[in-house]
Structures are given as C-alpha cells and as structure tokens.
Amino acid sequence: MISTRPESRFAGLFASDRLMLCGLAVFVISLSALPLGRLLLEGVAPGGDPGLGVAREVLSSKSTWLATRRSMITGIGGAVISVILGSIFALLVALTNIRAKGPLVFCFMIPMMIPPQITALSWIQLFGPSSALLNALGIAPPLGSPHPMYSQEGIILLLGVQHAPLVFLALRAGLRSLPREMVEAARISGSGRLRVMFDVVVPLMTPPLIAGGALAFVSAIGNFGIPAMLGTPVSYTTLPVLIYQRLSGFGPSIISEVAILSIIIGVIALTGLLVQGWMLSRRDYRTIGAPSRTLDLTLGRLRPVAESGCWLVIAMILIAPLLALIATSLVSAYGVRLDFQTATLDAYREVIFRQEVTGRAFRNSFILAGGAALVLMFVAIPLAYFIAWRRSGLTRFLDIAAETPYALPGVVLAIACILIFLKPIPVLDISIYGTLWIIFAAYLGRFLTLGLRPVISAFIQTDRSLEEAAQSSGAGFLMRLRTAIAPAIAPSAAAGAILVFMTAFNELTVSALLWSSGTETLGVLVFNLDDGGYSVMASAVAVLAVIAILVLMTAVHALSGRLPKGVLPWQT
Amino acid sequence: MADLNITSVWKHFGEDAAVADVSLAAQSGEFVALLGPSGCGKTTLLRLVAGFERPTGGHIRIGDRDMVDGNGLFVPPEHRRVGMVFQSYALWPHMNVAENVGYPLRVRGLRGPEAGRRIDLALKQVGLGGLGDRRPANLSGGQRQRVALARCLAMEPDIVLLDEPLANLDAHLRESMQHQFRTFHQATGATMVYVTHDQAEAMALADRIAVMDRGKIVQLAPPPELYDRPASEMVARFIGRGQVISVTGAGQQSDGICSIRAGEQTFTVRGQVEAGQPARLCIRPEWLGIVEPDAEGSLRAGITARTYRGAVTSLEVAVSDDLTLSAEVPGFAGQIGDTVGVTIRDGWVLPQ
C-alpha cells in the first residue's frame, strides 16, 4: 500500500491550491485592479478631497481638447492605414499563390516588434535635409526645407505602419479558419472569383477586420514614441505627449490633472473596444464547418506584380528606414556627407565604451525586462492553470484584470502607478517612487497578459487528463503542478517570457513617465538622445537595439516547431 | 438535366496520382454513387467534375458541353451549371436561409418576385417552407443540409454533386435524409453523383455504384450485382463484409454454375472455374449454413467467437487452422466452443 498524505485535514481553506489562487489573486489585483481603481478615485477625489473641481478645470482647458482631437485624428487615421495595409497583405498571403510567404510575413511583422521611438527615429533619418542616406545618395532636399515627417501626416503614416501587423494577424487568422467550402459553394452557384470576394469572403471577414482595426486604433491612441518624436518639433501634441510634457514640466504636484487626462485617454480606448464589441454582437458570423487548407487562388500573370508590390512596400516601410538609421549611425557628425572615407564607428564606440548612461540604460532595461519575464513566467503557469482549467467567478475576474493594463494605453497604467507608489507603501513603509522598482511594478502589471496568453492557449490545447492521471496516482496539487503540468506547458511559458522580454526591453511609454536620473531605460535613452540633438548616437543605440530584437525574433522563430500554435505573434 | 462523360481522367498531386485514368459515363437522370475507403480518390474525382481541381489529363463533358477537353479548355466552376451539396453544408452565416437559397439566382441577376417564388418553391420542396428568415446558425444539422439542398434546387443545375452530405449527421437523421435525397432525385430527375464511404448509403440510394480504390474505379455496377458478383477481392471484402477463401475447381455444371472443393467437401456455387484449377471464392456471411455437426456434405468446425446482433447472430467458425469463416444465423444461436457443421449454400468465384 502507498500511504497517502492526510490532505483532507487541510481541505477547504488551507488546501495548497486555494492558497496559491489567493496569492495569485493578490498579485494580479495589486498590480492591475488596485492602481487602476486608485486612478479612477483620483478623478473624483483629487488629492483625497472629493470634488470635481480639477476635472472641470482640465476638461474646460483648450489644450486638453486640442490634444484629444489630435489623438482622435491620428488614432483613426493610423487605424485606417493599418487596415488597408494589413488587409492587402493578409489577403495576398492567405488566399493567393504568391511565393516566399514566410520571409514576407516575417519582414512585415518586424515593424510591430521595433519600438515606436526607433521607428520614428529611422523615418526621421530617412527624409529631411540632414538625412545621411539621402545626402550620401545626393538626393537630399535643400537645407532649411521642412521635414515631411514632422507633421500630422507623418504621425498618421507611422502609426499605420507600426500597427498594420495587428490587422494582418487578425485577418489572416480569420482567413485561415474560413472553410474552403464557403467559397466553393459560391463558385458553384455561379460567382466568379472577384464576386466571391465581395459576396462571401469580405462579409465573413468583418469580425477580424473590426477586431484588428479596433486594436490598431487603441494602440495608436496610446502610442507615445511616434507623436512625441514627430509632433514635438512642430508643437503637435496628442494626449500621451501632453501628459508627458505636463508631468516632466511640473512634476508630481499636478498628478491630479494628468490623472484626469489619462482617464480621458482610457475612456477613448475603452470606447473603441466597446464599439468593436457592439458591432460584432449585431450579427452572427460564426462559420459552420471545419477549416480547410488555404484557398490558393492562382494569380497567373498578376503574380509577379503582386509579389513585387509586396516587397516594394517592405522596402519602403522597413528596409529604407533601417538603412537610413544605419547610415546616420555611421557618420562622424550630423550633417556630414557619408561615403567610404567618412564612415566611422565612432558613435558606437562612444555609446558602448564611453557614455556611462548608455551602459546604465542597457543594464537597467536588461534587468527590468529579464526580471519581469522571469517573474511573469512563474506567475503565468499557475495563473493560466486556474484560468483555463479551474474556471470560476474569481478566475474570470483575474483574466480580465490581467488583460486590462495592456489593453489600455501605457500612460494610464504609468499614471496609476505614480499615484499608488508616490507615498511609501503602507505597513512596509518603503518608498519605491523614483527607483527601478516602480518601473518594475508597472512592467509586471502591463506585460502580465503577454506572458499569460501563450500559456492559457497551451492549457486549452492540452488534455486535462494529464493532471487527472497524476491526481489519481496520488499526487497533491503542488506535486502535480511541478511534475505533470509545468513540463508540458514550459515551452509556451518560455515563449511568453521571451515576448515579455522583447516588449519590455525597448519599452518607452511607461518608463518615460516613471524614470528618474539613474533609472533610464533603453527606450528613454534613445528618446533623450534624440531630444537632446544627439541624432547620431541615438541612431547607434537604436541600431544595437534593433539587432537585439532581430536576434531574439530569430531565436524564438527557430524554437517555433516546439511551441503550440498561435503562441508567436508573428505566426498565428 | 444532362449526362456526364468522364474519359481517361488523371489528377496528380506532385508525383502521386489521386485519380488514375478514370472513365465514367452517367446517363441523364442517373444516380451514381462513388464509394470507397478514405483516400481512394472519390472526392478528388467529384471536385474534378465540379471544377475545383484541374485534371492533369483526360476529358470531362456535361451534356453537350466540354468542361475539360485535354487541349487546355477548362471551364471554371461558376460556368459549369453544376450544383453541389457539401459535407459541412457551406451555408453562409451572414445570409439568412432565403438569401442562401437565392444566392445562385442573385448571381444570375434574377431578383424580385420571380426569385422569391423560386426560393419559396425550393424551400417547400425540402420541407422548410416558411423558414426563409432564419439564420443558418439557428437551424439543426438536418435542416441545414436541407437548406443546402434547396440552394442546389434553386439553381436548376445540369448535374448535382453530393460530397458525403450525411457524414455529419447522426444515424437516425441520416435515414430520413436518405429518404429526402431519394424524393429529391425522383422529383427533379437530376443526374446525381454522390460520394460516400458508407456502403449502406450507396446501396440504398444509387442506381449504380462505382467502387474506387487507389485512384481507380474497380467496379461500376448496380448495387445487387456489386453484392452478388463482385469483380475483385477488394470489392468483395469492402462490400457486405465479404470473405474470400482459396478453393479448387471441381467441374463446370452449366454456364455460370460450377462445383468447387473447400475443406473435404464439394459445394455448388456461381461462377466459372475449370476442374483442378485454384480459385478465389467470395462468400457472404448469410450464404453459409450452420447445421448439425457431421451432417452430410458439411464441414466440421468449432465456434470461436459469437456476436449477438439482434435479428441475427454472427459466428466465427474455425474449419481448420488456416480456414476460419464468418457466418450469420437468424436469432440467438451457438456458443463458443460448440462443434457445428458448416455448408456453403451460395458463393461467387471471383473472375481471374
């Protein structure tokens, strides 16, 4: 006989699984629900005194509405470009027989993985009178002419490019699950290919298009790096930039004011998501029938045209800006004409070996991103277990609470974290404001869902009998988690951790509001260098960061065979 | 309605031939079933007729129109006037039932009261009158299949193709839908090609069945002929749980009737075989008789397995170490270990 441990004595309140669920609930709530709740409280009771005076003041300010309008314009404009670009690519890749789809998709996804401030920087380096690339080619516009990217149109274009992969992924996933028979039934009813597109494919793709468009809108609304770098020189201010300017100009004393501003931006994002939900609920788009292999429309003579069009777009939105970035990083001084004689690695030497702040920023970002990835990996496995396999009211709440800080613009959580950590933490009496820890706490809250989603989908794809077999063998909860569940889920948890790392490593929006001298992150560094006029060094740091991203993407890509489907954002 | 002529059609996927040199002629109004194990090429053949696959060789002709002529002519599916009922029904969730059924009419530019009349008629014919406003998601599986059938009806096709249309339905519903298809066929007189892996379904519905194996049609015949006179071992085994044993010819009695020796006994069966020549004999379980042990002209055998099936009992009887037969006897009979006599009451010598 195998003796069983008297687990029943602790059954109920003190069972190990219950204790763990409680711990996870405390973790999620204190990093997500609590700060966001505190932010809402600040809106109706600024500084602890109930009253709407501050709110009225902020809402009646002209600058508030100007920034709101500009956020809306750039958000909607960016989403429109994302939808157009993303759906053309998705339709071509998912439905036709164009060649080299793998490299094409990989390249199309890269803008999403490159942080916005670097995207903006590279486009700034691509155009304008001082462009090292254009000067090297001798086609730069004359000195003194306005830079085309420093404008509303420039912001819209880059927001569109940055978030087009979101639409692409949503639509491609939808097209992949579109049963082939849906299209064939229309063909056999007498519809030609083009007509099938409009009668069947497009209507059935409404949900992913709406979902992708909404996601692109919400991401564009919350984007800080692009409008900050392209708008600031021409005083074009969106809400996140306004919040940043207020906070860096006046310090935490005007926290109540920026709290209202971040509530406005949160409400806009939430409205976007609610409108999406409402549009989708109006009709039943569920398709019946198993998804079949891709449709493979034969393009015939049009194929080379479509292929070159795709690669031309990639060249324009990815390769040219990156080349411009590299070109700038190689000149000896900004404005110097680049050729084989003047090309120099001085900027790299400077940022790697001489500038103390660069090393510090790399170290800070590495510690923050690595720490967040590691902590979230260990949180994600049990949390996903409860969310996927042990559903209850509490786990559903935790699921939403984990999602919210990432669904809302980054400034919202950043302001919420300032509010909650400005004063020392009660009981412990430790103040983390102004230290790395406040950025760390914000990262844990913001990126929790990135680490969690892959693990949840792995749990959903895994048969629960895996656990039940261990259970009937007599293994207690922690034993089961450690020996039967975690090993099966580990690859997805690792993939999630890598996603967290990649996103956090170059993050700007949150750290821009939370950093102080000594706690600069890599994102802040690029932003500050450019802001201070050190374009060459900013470009050098950006090139190093892009290399780091590409290495990571390639490494995870190589692992993809061992991961469950849908874990990597650039794959589905 | 039109006849269908498939001549020497090939379809390669890479190196593999999914359909290899298949010829099939269906008369106008005929109901032909394509039957075979999965991967035999039956669905590919159907999709070649529909135009969803392009053959790598051969001719396909519907009525007096060439669809594929082997010289580069390829009529796309939308111009073939062929109706198809899909396994997954393929109803568009963004259209209601009437819009789904009316889609082929809309594509042809037919709108207004005339279209409405034809939609109503098609829905009535499949027993779904008045459900035009429903969404496909709110219908049962059987109702969805009827809508798919009505959509097919509304387009008044030359030929109707059905791709395992009952595979997603439960056994009870399948029965009633079989009835629906038969009524549909009688009412419209349409030429129908029906793909299935279920032989009972094919037997119940088809005028002729084409049994396919590894890309080829191995036998094309009316169901009774397929059952009584299979052309090959594969057909014999695939249809009606047939068994094939080795026997020796013992003389021709008349045209089509001969004697064979199996075990220590001589039996009279159908077919042609010369005396002394080895042959393969197809036996259906119900063609065997179970009699008293040592009864005259019977083989002595022991019962090794028994499965009670309600109306009949299936018995496995071992005649010798290398000869075990499956028999079927009415009612509840036999016990494992019993010794019995086995007679071959009917059999079919497979053509060499």
Image: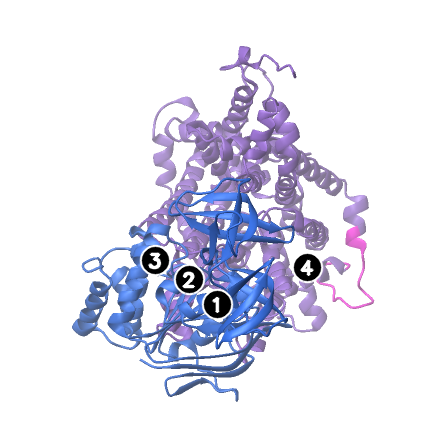
Dot 4, crowdedness within 10 Å: few (<14), some or many (≥20)? many
Q: Nearer the viewer, mark 3 or mark 1?
A: 1
Q: Earlier in the sequence, mark 1 or mark 2?
A: 1
Q: Which chain is blue?
A: B
**Which of label 1 and label 4 is nearer to you?**
1
At x 52% / y 89%, what residue is drawn?
B71
Residue corresponding to mark 4:
A325
| Membership of B167 in magenta stretch | no
Tint applied to chain A in the drawing: purple
- Protein image colouring: by chain
Circle 1/circle 4 CB separation < 8 Å? no
Select label 3 or label 4 by which is in front.
3
Label 2, label 3: how far apart the Cα atoms are = 21 Å
Mark 2 or mark 3: name the one nearer the start of the chain. Answer: 3
Asked if badges 3 and 1 are on one and the same chain, I answer: yes
Q: Where does the magenta region start and end?
A: A332-348
Label 4 to label 2: alpha-carbon separation:
58 Å
Q: Which of disc 1 and disc 3 is earlier in sequence?
A: 1
Label 2 sits on what residue type? Answer: Glu
